[in-house]
Amino acid sequence: MPRLLRELWRRPAGLVGSVVVVVLLVTAAVALFWTPQNPFTANPSIAWQGPSFAHLFGTDAIGSDIFSYLMAGSKTTVVVAALSALVAGLIGIALTALGSLTSHWVREPVAVLIDILIAFPILLIAMLLSAVFGGSLTVVIVSVGIGFGVNLARVARGEVRGVLGTDYVLAARASGAGPWRILIRHVLPNVAPVFIVQLSLAAAVAILAEAGLSFLGYGAPSSTASWGRLLSSLQRYITVHPWSVLWPGLTITITVLGLNLLGDALREATDPRLKESRGEKTRRAEWRRDRRRARAEVVR
Amino acid sequence: MTLTVTDLTIDIDGRTVVDRLSFTVADGARFGIIGESGSGKSLTALAVLGLLPDAATASGSIRLTVDGGVEIELLGLPDRELAHIRGSAIGMVFQEPRTALNPLRRVGRQIGEPLRIHDGLSKHEANARAIELAHEVLLPDPERLLRRYPHELSGGQRQRVAIAMAIACSPSLLIADEPTTALDVTIQAEILELFDELVDTTGASLIFVTHDLAVLAEVATDVVVLSHGRAVESGPVAEVMRAPQHPVTRSLIAAARATSWSPGASR
Amino acid sequence: MIAMMTARGLSRDYHQPREGLFARPLVRPALRDVDVTVEHGEALAIIGESGSGKSTLVRLLLALDRPTAGTVEFEGRPVLPGSARSLRWLRRETGIVLQDPYASLDPRMTVGAIVAEPLEALGIPGNHRAMVTAMLLRVGLDADSVDRYPHEFSGGQRQRIALSRALVHGPRLLVGDEPLSALDVTVRAQILELLRDLRRDLGLSMILVSHDIGLVYHLCERVMVMKDGVVVESGPTLEVLENPQHPYTRQLIAAVPTLDAAPGATP
């Protein structure tokens, strides 16, 4: 684990992504207890103020503090991202398992099912669900969960089949390994990194989806702070007050970008070729020490 | 035509993978470059045609002397001019026919491509010449086969197509980089025989890169033995095999003998 | 004296996707009615080129695949494809080494874990770490290899690791599917000698699948030649090599390049 983190932070993408995630989580945690102003108070007399000490990002059409609203919205973002990733992960695992570890008669229909479900874009699922249940965050989470979960299954299924076809799994079978052992010792460790990367991307997609769906009115109700909602309400005035839209827009962009970068860096960092054994560590340390000594010799 | 390599040095990412290599390929010679993996033999072959990877830097000299005494320094020649030489004066056959052939184009068109680029043949003329070339490389039923895509051919057939492409414009130098390593032994024998005949009939010089001592013995008249990027021994193949001087050559030959069989060996 | 392994009438068909919607499903016979016998302490070679069915045969013998027809017996006991548990007895007696040293070791496991896998999967009592270390030393690797990862080793070293995994649980039959093909010649000679030593010291019987006649000559007393899924010839190695009866065997032997060849001589 510490090795993974070191690999991750060696890369600028990993560093930036991690920072974004940490900032997001901290902001959401803080927002549970405190925001500079009440994000929902309407105070039309101070509407459309520019950035100031009291209102870091200024105020919106009804005089609410944008910065506080965005802080409050981060709670929504975190919840949606985390739960969507969770749902996507569970659906992904279930479909992957059904699609690759079962008998032929189960596998083929599941493959077809996955291919059919992939055809449904998240937005369509969201619209269908909100038509029945009304718009809500749950709708967002479920839509992204299903939409991305299916995608995840497709990717993971390919990985699993790839691993099952390798020579080392054949050798494991020849050594007496049964299906459980192969699953836990070989398939999982080799597929998990891909899965983790996909989950981080799922979170990114979820945030974007929530913003988009809330923007369109299918997502968060008006009582819940949501970045997409703010974007929606501010964009109506874009011709008159163009700058205020920048704040929610940038926030969404940077967060999603950060998650994507994190996903990319994770993909690279989990390459097994970078795994360092204890032996290599000691040898590297020895080499460094020898080099230092040699340099010291030269200086003398 | 002669090829003279002098002090060829290739660095990749700060590592020297070919170190001051010098050898001469005489006119009409069958020159072998042998070494184990990592010896730099493939890179040497690629350097002649300027096909080294971007991360590589090469220094030294690779001089091509054509009939008439014209000398061309190939190393450092701009790509545009090298492109004139590739496929026309010098043809190359690679180890994996899959990478040499475009999977999306019919093989007949691919054989015709150097003809159209270098000799300016029309599509119709190139097609006709491609069929002739297919006959020369002993491809069965050329009219039909040339209309196929690479994945529809066997490994041996693909390699013959690659050879046809390489000799299309009658090059005076043919470079083959482990062309039979990926092939079955019976197919390998046929391909080696093909090289033999082509070199005989066209009078071209041949540079043959391999790691297999027996293949080298069948194909080459002269050889340079590479180890870790350096030439450790060179000379006529028969002599080097009979009386190897360098320990690397000796261990190669000893290892080859320990793992091979020839008719009469058991008696 | 009952043979170690016998197979009768082994056949394996592969079903391929149809050419068109109304075309008949394709059936490719990879193996047709093959008989195999391996005596105790004997080394049998299965020679063939690609498509001969040799790899399929080996997988059927070890119940890693299900035959379309035919039977396999190990010391008279039927080998029936089934659950891992039902085959445990066979797994204890056999070990396999595969061709590609870069694909046969799980890149995410340490060498120690890889080699210990048979011990764990078969529930063999004892100090696994000690057994693994002893085996690694036996094949010529350092004891500290246990904690390292496959990517830190060369191709030859990886095959030694694979060999350790195949032998750590004390099997009596070693099966190799082209175990030396991907290696450099000097490494090949070393591993060949290692195989000979291990066979002698551990009293192993062996089935070696290869296309390399030289290896077969140096390692195996009996040989079986396969082509297109059938056995075309079999017998003692020296006899088959010196007096090949079947035209394909003759062709195969003639195709092998020899170290004492004269280049330019078209056979």
Image: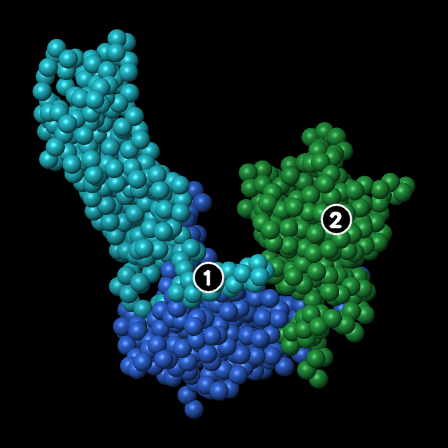
Q: Is residue B262 left or right of residue A265?
A: right
Rendering coords of residue C217 (x, y %): 61, 78
Label at residue B176: none
Crowding at mark 1 (Cα within 10 Å: few <14, some 14-19, many 20+): few
Taking the spot 28% from the left edge, 20% from the top edge, the residue there is A246
Q: Are marks 1 and 2 in contact (CB under 8 Å)?
A: no
- The quadrant of the rendering that contains the N terminus of chain C is bottom left
Give the camera-side residue of C25 and B197: B197
Callout 2, which amino acid?
Answer: Gly
Q: Which residue bears the numbered disc 1?
A: A284
Q: Is residue C148 above or below residue B2?
A: below
Hue of chain B?
A: green
Query: Looking at the image, which residue is at 38% across and 71% down?
Result: C112
User: Residue B43 versus residue C216: which sits nearer the camera?
Assistant: B43
Residue C111 visible in the displayed image: yes
Q: Please tell me whether residue A36 is drawn above or below residue B4 in the rendered image.
A: above
How many numbered tags mark residues here? 2
The residue that label 2 is drawn on is B60
Percent coordinates x, y for residue B230 in the rendering:
70, 60
As shown in the figure, which amino acid type bears the numbered disc 1? Arg
Question: Chain A shown in which color?
Answer: cyan
Residue under the image location 54 percent in, 46 percent down:
B151
